[in-house]
Image: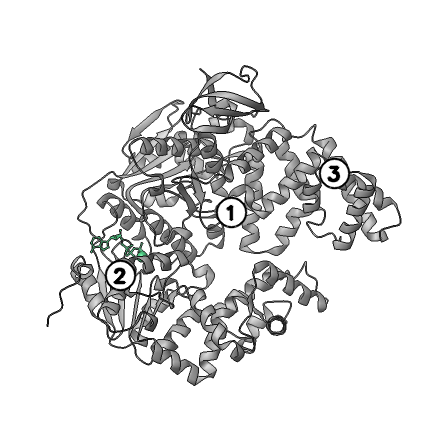
Amino acid sequence: PPVEAPNWVANLNPPQRDAVLTSEGPVLMLAGAGTGKTAALTARLANLVHERKAWPSEILCVTFTNRAAREMRERVGTLIGPAVEGMPWLGTFHSICARMLRRHAELAGLESNYTIIDMDDQQRLLKQLIAERELDEKRWPARQLAGLIDRWKNRGLNPEDLDAAENESYANGRGQELYAAYQARLKALNACDFGDLLLHMLNIFRRNRDVLEQYQQRFKYVMVDEYQDTNAVQYLWLRLIAQARKNICVVGDDDQSIYSWRGAEVANILRFEKDFPGAKVIRLEQNYRSTPQILAAASGLIAENSERLGKTLWTERHAGDPVRVVGVWDAPEEARRVGEDIERLEREGAPLDQIAILVRAQYQTREFEDRFIQIGLNYRIVGGFRFYERAEIRDALAYLRVIAQPSDDLAFERIYNQPKRGLGAKTLEKMHQHARKTGMPLAAASLQLADSDELPKRAGGTIAALMRDFLRWREEADNLSSAELLRQVLEESGYNAMLQAERSAEAAGRLENLSELARAMEDYESLTDFLEHVSLVMDNDARDDGEKITIMTMHAAKGLEFEHVFLPGWEEGVFPSQRSLDEGGLASLEEERRLAYVAITRARRRCTILHAANRRIYGQWTSSIPSRFIEELPEDHIEQETTMSGGASLWRANWSDQDDPFAHVSSSRPERSQQRGPGWQRALATGYQTTPKKLKEPTRSAASFAAKARKDVAIGDRVFHEKFGYGEVQAQEGNKLEIAFETTGVKRVIDSFVKKA
Ligand code: ATP
Ligand code: MG
């Protein structure tokens, strides 16, 4: 009897339906952003189960994140009901391989209760191995070795597979030896790292036909989302499993390949038809996510890439707003502007969880976090720590706390051996004992101890030197701005050097975060003011209620969608990133452009791109130029706007040689010839550098108010707060007020945000 078409198929367009109903044989769904690839894959999964072609446990389905797996499981659940009793093999490559490896651990020389170590452990192990070989860790940092080992594992290479060049890439030809030693040590510990999960399973499949066949039999269907971002080891693993039945359906978009730095190979998509001859290639062209304006802007941008398959996208949605490109004076104004826009959206009824801010680099989140806390907008940081919770930020703050408050034992304990000074747990124990005995703070007690003979000479000397440093920093705190003080501390303590020696992308990110911290401090008059601000921020972090704005990196936003998307920092050197520009290659620039395409296409309704005319880098004002990606957006689909609330705009002057200091222009984009007028050229010739003091400090934005307590507000006063409404002051502590608001309850706020009512 004809089966009634289930509604998940009825709702799909013909090519999507084709992908769902073609259950046998290889299928490649190659299509642009928002065309319903993930939706089709989900329907396909539901259909296979519904049609009894396979039990849920006989389908292998790989998603890019655990979150995507969860969403897919939920959607399949709503489509086919409780018939789906879990989907054991729906997940990320890592989660699926971890599950398999538990069953076959002995084939990898492990026991089934093996542990998965994190990056910290990984590095500690490597450090030991490096030290055992008496290699100079400064020259050959553990982090560098960790990076190499990851890369080898991503490529499916075991130690014995390395060629001479790979072997040479660490410590003059000792790469292979150390990689092998690391693997042996992991085995001895009954542990493996993330890269091993896949590599072990690939090895097991290759060396044990029976195990491979077992999985080839089990998985009647294989499906993979975001296929363009699979790396070699994932690809090889998939190919082995799918080879027998060849029922494999992969979906992807070459324009969204953004993980080549992690070893992803977009070539895997192009190779699919060769690996699986006769594969059915399905192209989806109708986009259901975004307005035509957003789509046209993104398509115009990605058309600038040379290495792409090319595709057309169309939509039936009605026009909507053009993509807005907003030029602001500086980073605080950028955050303020986004905050205002979001408050307006909120008033218009937009739920906060439909709003996202997507940044290129983690450090960019700080300005937004500070601003949102001040105006009381709920936000969450996805896929990373909140700015002030990051390890390097906490370390830096700990130094400052010890300077400001010598009796801050917790802070002292955090950094007494960070960077490594050779002070171990034994020394710390003695310091604690002495502090308890004498009733002194830890730092003071350790100085006294350093003079005694209770500590080994070397440890004593190290502590004494550290305490001398603190004494000097404390004196200098009176003369230097706190930002300058921080920079000096990071230099002189060896903290910067420690990160620089690591020579990894991650360490570079940490250094960026630290200079962002210094930038944040420039807005405060004293160290105490700043530390107070931080404790307030941290305090607010604990709150967890209601809808939230999402702040995340563009990378983490892959596959997601939001009604409203804000894309700040579109300036040369921020986005495209300085690193991609320094590397210089066309490939890295094209990858940045794909990232821009991913970012814009996350938006359903509105997309706002921002760029600031000035960034403060190491205390100096530097004028920045708008990202080349802005230039590349098709003019018909964008709306250019500059807000110059903060004084003369160098950026604007560069563009048109006009000098209209307080212009607030909202117009369509100036002619390109005009943009490249004499001012533009001159700016190009001078490299866009202006000397620091020439630029007037912008008007202090609300985000950069000085944290001085107000004298005109007292306990018992009735006040008005722009976000929380009317309330009564209950307590005052520095510039922080505790206010019982009439409608929103008791909150701690910063006093500059209240007016006396
Ligand atoms: P990306 O490349 O960003 O991962 P995608 O191709 O996976 O995008 P989906 O996330 O599956 O796209 O779908 C985008 C939006 O379009 C979703 O909101 C989805 O519900 C909707 N959608 C997909 N297919 C259809 C359809 N046939 N009819 C109506 N809406 C659809
Ligand atoms: Mg998708």
Q: Quadrant of ligand 2?
A: bottom left
Provide the residue designation for mark 1. Answer: 385
Q: Quadrant of residue 123?
A: bottom right
Q: Residues within 10 Å of mark 3 (few under 14, many from 20)?
A: many
Q: Secondary structure at mark 2?
A: helix
Image coords of residue 402 (percent x, y):
70, 38
Residue 363 as seen in the image, left or right of residue 559 = right
Provide the residue designation for mark 3. Answer: 470
Image coords of residue 518 (percent x, y):
58, 37
**Labels 2, 1: front one:** 2
Do we see residue 699 in this rendering? no
For marks 2 and 1, give the CA distance: 36 Å
The residue drawn where x is 50% and y is 16% is 717
Q: Quadrant of residue 727?
A: top left
Dot 2 or dot 3, earlier in sequence: 2
Look at the numbered discs 2 and 3 and tell me whether their residues touch, using CB distance below 8 Å: no
**Labels 2, 3: front one:** 2
Q: Amino acid at mark 1?
A: Phe
